[in-house]
Amino acid sequence: MSSVPVDEGGRTFTERVYSTIESLAEGEVATYGEIAADAGRPGAARAVGRILANSDGLPWWRVVTREGRLVPGLEDEHALRLAREGLAVRHNRVVRSSGAKPE
């Protein structure tokens, strides 16, 4: 029987990813890698992407690659949602400003 690793609070990695993404404020972006690290699994950026791809209701548009790239195939919608939150996008990448992740 396999078990799913949990943290001290009894939360799984997936639950921690959800919590971390839900905590992003309007106009704030983070990278998949930052989300993974915040959720306790540095280096698990791809796992964060899989979780987001299978989620419902998370503010997925606040998560970008370390280069600031938008979700392939959803660039227009991604850019629109970020623009609504006051973020600029050029060439399918978030334009980084002070105070916003990624750095």
Image (tube, rainbow, N blue to C red):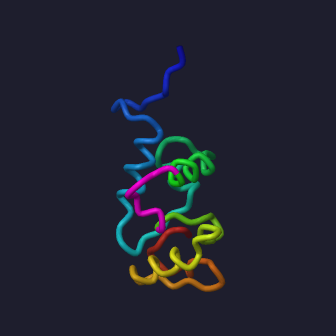
Name the one closer to the observer, 32 or 42.
32
The x and y percentages for residue 22 are 36, 57
Which segment is the magenta one?
54-61
Q: Is residue 27 magenta?
A: no
Q: Is residue 58 magenta?
A: yes
The x and y percentages for residue 47 are 59, 46
- Residue furthest to the top in view is 1
Which residue is rendered at x = 45% and y = 48% of the image?
17
Can you say whether 100 is above or below 1 in the image?
below
Which residue is rendered at x = 63% and y = 46% of the image?
43
Q: Quadrant of the C terminus?
A: bottom right
Report the number of numbered marks: 0
Name the one closer to the observer, 9 or 76.
76
Can you say whether 101 is above or below 36 in the image?
below
Can you say whether 33 is above or below 72 in the image?
above
Main secondary structure found in the magenta portion = loop
The x and y percentages for residue 33 are 58, 54
Which residue is rendered at x = 56% and y = 66% of the image?
64
Q: Quadrant of residue 75?
A: bottom right
Name the one closer to the observer, 5 or 2.
2
Can you say whether 25 is above or below 18 in the image?
below
The x and y percentages for residue 88 are 51, 85
